[in-house]
Amino acid sequence: MLSMASPHAVHSAQEAEHQRAAPDAERASADRSPQQAPALAFQRTIGNRALAALVPRLGVQRLDDGPTAEAEPEAGAPEDVGADRPMIRFGSRGPAVIEAQVRLNAAGAAPALAPLVPDGIFGPLTLGATRTFQTANGLVPDGIIGPLTWAALLAVVPPGGPPLFSLGSTGEEVGLLEQRLNAAGMADPFLPIDATYDLAVLVAVARFQFEEMGAIPTGAVDQATWDALAQAAPGGEVDATGVATHVPSVEPEPRGEQVEGTSLHMVVGPPAGLTEGPAVEEFQQKLNVVRAAAGLEPIAVNGFWNDLTRDATQAYQSSVGLAPTGIGDLPTWARLDQDAPVTTVGFVERQWTQQQGGLETGMTAAGGGGSRYSWRILPNQILVTVKVDFRNNPPSPDWFGHVPTAWNRFKAVSDSGDEVAINFEMVQGTGGDANVVDVKTGTGRANAGEWFLGDTDAANTIPHEYGHLIGLRDEYQVHPGDYREITGNEPPVGATAEPADGATPLQIANELQDAMITRNDTAAKAATIDRGIQMGAFAQRIVGAYAGLPAVVVPAKGPPKPKPSFTTSRTDIASDLFRALDKSYEIIQVLTYSTGSMMGDPSRVTDPHDHGVRPRHVREFVDLVAAARGGTWEVQAR
């Protein structure tokens, strides 16, 4: 069973409102409205100077470029053909014009060396291309794009290329396009992976063509653009098992965000600090580095605080202008880290928080302490040790074996071929450098400081909680931006299909908000889970639609399970659901992202490309080996 990090966890829980800034990846539908001026968006994308450079070749299409004569609709056009597209003509503006311009380019209706700029303005060049297209397709060349011309344009597919996306197109290929545009750095903010081809996607395509391909930006995803994107941002292909691979996007950071103002070190030296153990040994090693630089004799590095360590500390403090306290306080640690950054042993207390599952979790001093662990570089291994003070009941002996079984899967390999195994262990002990875990009988939902002897899935639960004790975040029920940061990959496209009853994202978002107002768990489940909605693109359209709803006040709920009143955040549907409902887990699950890794939710997420302990989880320790031994090191399975 998996957990929410925490007895040490900072759960402002159900009593406090969680204020969260709009996540980068799901800021979405409200900010990317189809009503946004396309010409301005395109101009912002490629820049004024670049746009000016294109003017001599491509022309400037303005409303005053010529007369705006009224014209009748195309003769003989059935009323139901192209009914979802507006009639556009000279002088028209907007997203429909952009789509027409892209399709006219793909059809070859504009000169190959001077395609239409998809600026959303129906000027003389677009007029000429429209007449050329109409003539080539046996239509009346009146320059008006009505139902018959739209029907012909919608049938356009670039020769030998992928399907040409229209504004409003949806599907897995559009999701892959969004992933690759994000990974290539073409969207700011990141595009939500909602598998919807909208104006922001088109602008990102044009930016890629201009900045990365050195081509005239048409916004059309032809084969050349698709191939260039696949090279710039590889991944996303479906493998032999039918599962899409991940699209790498950023450098992963699976560790929890360090609480501002805290240190990774603990004070060493009496009367208030640790007096023995890896933290003292690390401090002694650092003192010897600076003593050697000053031509002084080394002190014994034995992990025990003694008079010689105290005297060496005072001497060092005086030499660098620090108060000669004679203890390893935090100012002394900070200066030693600058003067002696590399050691072969270390101790870490990482205090961290994260947004997950609709609330704030983590391990902090306020909750009982941060994640505490030590590491030691030996000839053929780096050994990571977590000491646990088990209280109230003896721990299960099996727990100690579950950790190495799950975690000892990788090695650090240098560019010269040297190998160092990355090994993990859990030991029992007490003291200020130990993590405290309350051992309970029976079963329950474990967290970083509360484990259950009756847990039937301890082989997965204990290694997951061990991950928190070395500072790793949960990887389930996280927002798109956090998923990207933790895993380094773009969020998966996932499920793209609308529910069988045809409910729209806006309809579902309204139903969810109504369920929150009435504190109705059943209604919220009916709006989502009972409709078969799954994690992925369609669910993210619901998230985007919810962000566009007006904020409302959810009244307080009385006994027997009281909940305080709050105002919906719009930008954090997970938090709103958690605060409003008693049974929100499964609903939050489909509206956020989870991995199938050891730190994710493998019981609900099957991902052959991200399961068990992953290289990102052990990268910290490879970096420590690289710092101590020099050279370039990478993580490899063993």
Image (cartoon, rainbow, N blue to C red):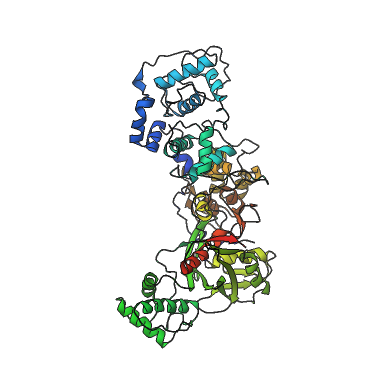
Residue 325 seen from this side: no
Q: Nearer the viewer, residue 464 or 35?
A: 464
Q: Residue lying at the far front in this picture: please name it.
A: 416
**Left or right: residue 41 compared with residue 372:** left
Q: Nearer the viewer, residue 260 or 546?
A: 260
Q: Quadrant of the N terminus?
A: bottom right
Residue 28 seen from this side: yes
Residue drawn at the location 45% of the way across and 30% of the way down: 218
Question: Where on the picture, by quarter, is residue 561?
Answer: bottom right
Where residue 10 appears, as percent x and y from the top left, is: 50, 64
Where residue 429 appears, as percent x and y from the top left, is: 57, 79
**Left or right: residue 564 compared with residue 318:** right
Q: Nearer the viewer, residue 585 or 286?
A: 286
Where residue 166 appears, as percent x and y from the top left, is: 53, 30
Where residue 625 appears, as percent x and y from the top left, is: 50, 67
Q: Nearer the viewer, residue 304 or 41?
A: 304
Q: From the viewer's perspective, is residue 231 above or below residue 595? A: above
Q: Residue lying at the far bottom in this picture: please name it.
A: 307
